Amino acid sequence: MNNCQQILEQLQRDFPNAQSELNFNNPYELIVAVILSAQCTDKRVNQVTPKLFELAPTPQALADMPLDLLEDTIRSCGFYHNKAKHLKSMAADVVSKYGGQVPSNLADLQTLAGVGRKTANVVYAVAFGGQAIAVDTHVFRVANRLGIATATNVLDTEKQLMAVIPQDRWADSHHHILLHGRYVCKAQKPNCAGCSVSQWCRYFKEHND
Ligand code: SF4
């Protein structure tokens, strides 16, 4: 078994029930929550979305929602001007191009205005059970520290992870790596002493030789 396989097996044992920590009831709610989660904690997003989904329970309602009311509702998530713009663009596209239903395949998700590659990958994997590796700040940092990727940007990291991880493990591995970054391999101060995969980690080796 190579290092990458050992690491993924261990992280699976560490996080056996890994899943999204965003609350949602359908693909529309998930895509909204993922857009709101940029530079914001899932916990904060989960505090904001119940009120938002009361006011805008469908893509049509979100597209029609007055911008100032939308901005006020999502303000505490940060970057609310941009996020409000992205939400309305996405909702308008879902209504005009896809009859009000969030599309279930990756190519169509990526055509939605305001939806980046990472958001499309998360929605495809989490809402529709597809295989994709969404590379957010945690996945980017952890994969490159571990050495299972050696890239300077998220797109190359995604491609490299897709090359070394079996396709039927892409979605699970995304969750495992993300949770490891959120709780152990933190940005400012990785908890290497308490890390279950340090023996295979490039960063650990480089800092302990
Ligand atoms: S050993 Fe340290 S740097 Fe490597 S994955 Fe664990 S916490 Fe992160």
Image (tube, rainbow, N blue to C red):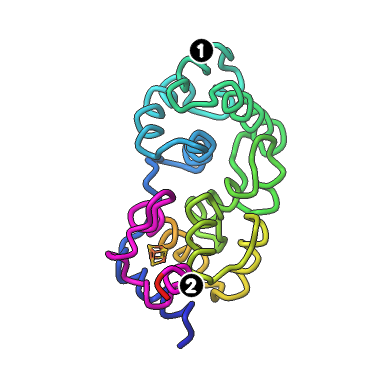
Q: Using the image as rendered, state which of residue 145 and residue 178 is in the foreground.
A: 145
Above or below, 66 against 105 in this view is: above
Under 8 Å from ligand 1: the CB of mark 2? yes
Task: Identify the residue at image location x=57%, y=28%.
Answer: 83
- Assess whether residue 76 is covered by the magenta stretch: no
In the image, the segment drawn in magenta is 179-207
Question: In which quadrant is the N terminus drawn?
Answer: bottom left
Left or right, 163 with reference to 38? right
- Assess whether residue 180 is covered by the magenta stretch: yes
Residue 30 location in percent, x, y? 48, 41
Residue pushed farthest bottom? 1
Question: In which quadrant is the C terminus drawn?
Answer: bottom left
Circle 1 residue: 69
Q: Which mark is residue 202?
A: 2
Residue 19 location in percent, x, y? 38, 55
Based on the displayed image, in which of its 4 quarters is residue 49 positioned?
top left
| Secondary structure of residue under mark 1 | helix
Left or right, 127 with reference to 21? right
Residue pushed farthest front? 209
Under 8 Å from ligand 1: the CB of mark 1? no
Left or right, 58 with reference to 49? right
| Secondary structure of residue under mark 2 | helix
